[in-house]
Image: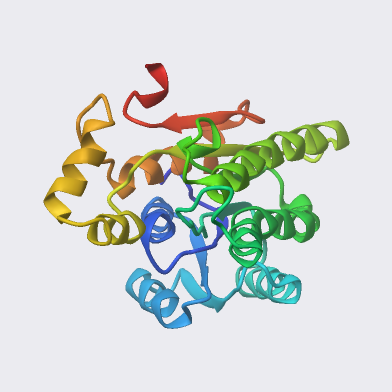
Amino acid sequence: MRAANKVALITGGASGLGKATAFMLAREGAKVAVTDRNLKGAREVAEEIGKNAIALDLDVTNEQQWIAALDTTVAAFGKLNVMVHSAGVGVLKNVEDISVEEWRFVHGVNLDGPFLGIKHGLSRMRPHAPGSIIIISSVSGIIAGHNMSAYNTSKAGARMLAKTTALHCAKRGYDIRCNSVHPTFIDTPMVQSMILSGGDPAQVRKKLESQVPLGRLGEPDDVANCILYLASDESKFVTGTEFVLDGGITAQ
């Protein structure tokens, strides 16, 4: 019960890393608000978890929906201790080919979303400290790719948002920590869609795995386990840093 007595709000909770995180935190004793713009999917996750979960409609680019989701979470569970920013999107286009609309869409979800959650979430978390904010960035926020202009820059921005938030909270004495998590290819619906759209799925998967020194894709629980550590009081002296879950890619 490493997350006992914690209340967590998770974005992108209907699938992928957000879904895995919701189940992981709930198994470890937390009450969770599963938020997603796919409300049907969020409800399915919350129903499977049971009475310690609620599902909320949340487009992370919408400020008013953020305020409503935060207030509903506190009203339902009495407090808020943990925010996990898992909602994310990507467009595989280089800096010349990507449209302004696509650029803004990727940055809106991947960077504006966590910003809005933190901006309005801190005041809800402070009365119930200690608290922890975890932003799921990406190894692509540390190393670049030629065809990932918006994804790279949005995830690099998320990394710095975690650091500046950590320092802000420390300076104000909030007892709220903030860190970023940087996975590589994880076997989630987002990566599966990349595999299916790239030609022969077996060959595309093999190509992705060949880029990872450990020779395989990560599993959602590999990331959820890291988030559990950061959400728990075990990590009470950890703030403003990044946790890289890349199978050795950045060691090369």
Residue 185 position by quadrant: top left
* Above or below: residue 3 compared with residue 44: above
- Find residue 151 and report its horizontal and vertical position in percent: 54, 49
Q: Is residue 60 above or below residue 25?
A: below
Q: Residue furthest front?
A: 96
The quadrant of the image that shows the C terminus is top left
Q: Nearer the viewer, residue 108 or 76?
A: 108
Side of 10 relative to 197 (left or right): right
**Does 250 sit left or right of 124 as displayed?**
left
Seen in the image, is 109 located left or right of residue 172?
left
Residue located 85% across and 31% down the image? 171
Q: Where's residue 104, x and y in %?
A: 66, 61
Residue found farthest to the bottom: 40
**Considering depth in this image, is 1 or 103 the residue closer to the camera?**
103
| Residue 172 picture location, percent across and down | 87, 37
Residue occupying the point 50% across, 76% down: 55
- Give the colour scheme shown: rainbow
Is residue 136 at all visible to an observer of this figure? no
**Residue 62 visible to the viewer:** yes
- The structure residue drawn at horizontal position 63% and vertical position 44%, both measured from the top left corner, is 158
Where does the image place residue 70, in percent across and percent down from the top left? 68, 68
